[in-house]
Amino acid sequence: KAGVTQTPRYLIKTRGQQVTLSCSPISGHRSVSWYQQTPGQGLQFLFEYFSETQRNKGNFPGRFSGRQFSNSRSEMNVSTLELGDSALYLCASSLVSGTQYFGPGTRLTVL
Amino acid sequence: AQTVTQSQPEMSVQEAETVTLSCTYDTSESNYYLFWYKQPPSRQMILVIRQEAYKQQNATENRFSVNFQKAAKSFSLKISDSQLGDTAMYFCAFMLPEGGGATNKLIFGTGTLLAVQP
């Protein structure tokens, strides 16, 4: 089976812009979780989607949003980018719950 | 709230030797999952091993094994016969099961950077 894929792999944006990141889970996996990884804050949970519904949300401002499509693919959107949003954004998928398998990540740089 | 603590920011081991990475966690729940993930320089997060809290037997995956002490809330990872390819950041993570109020929400420790020396 193909693993979790994320696009794009690298992004450079400027402050105030918005960005959309995409994640395709492993075939058959219905849950997609998103994490932000920064040197200062480490790995932090953003949100989790299952069957197109957000089940859990981390402690991030409303500028961070996401959605999941009927084929389980997920997107996350960050509006009004700030310098502090520069990070590696990781997506992970799992069947329903349990072990999560990660994608390669999207490296976002905000200038 | 659950927390995960990794007290060793960096460790070094010689090739073919054995190394143990430490992890402690805090929770009031009795049923949960614990994981070790590795993140090599490529930044791809790779599952190393998983442990269910209700299982007393320690999980093992080839050269990787854990020492799970539920009462002490300790979950250490032992790597035997260390190889150069084991060089990576290792993260300990905690997760509640489905219906536990935080389904599929991994709580990570700060990581241990392991360097395997030739």
Image (cartoon, helix red, strand yellow):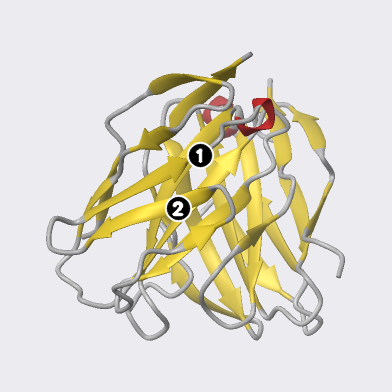
Front residue of this view, candidates B33 and B117? B117
Seen from the viewer's position, the closer of residues B60 and A13 is B60
> In the depicted view, which residue is nearer to us: B50 or B28?
B50
Dot 1: what SS?
A: loop
Q: At which x and y percent is residue A39? A: 49, 26
Residue A20 horizontal/vertical position (percent): 75, 51
What is the chain letter for disc 2? B
Q: Which residue is mark 1?
A: B80
- In terms of secondary structure, where does tag 2 sit? strand
Q: CA distance from mark 2 to mark 1?
A: 8 Å
Q: Callout 2, which amino acid?
A: Ser
Residue at image point 42% right, 26% down: A40
- Residue B64 is situated, as x and y percent measured from the top left of the image, at 51, 49
**Horizontal side, residue A30 vs residue B30: left or right:** right
Q: Nearer the viewer, residue B71 or B65?
A: B65
Q: Give the residue displayed 80% in from the left and 61% down from the top.
A: A3
The crowd level at tag 1 (other Cα within 10 Å; few <14, some 14-19, many 20+) is: some
Label 2–label 1 contact, CB within 8 A? yes
Nearer-N-terminus badge (2/1)? 2
Q: Which residue is mark 2?
A: B65
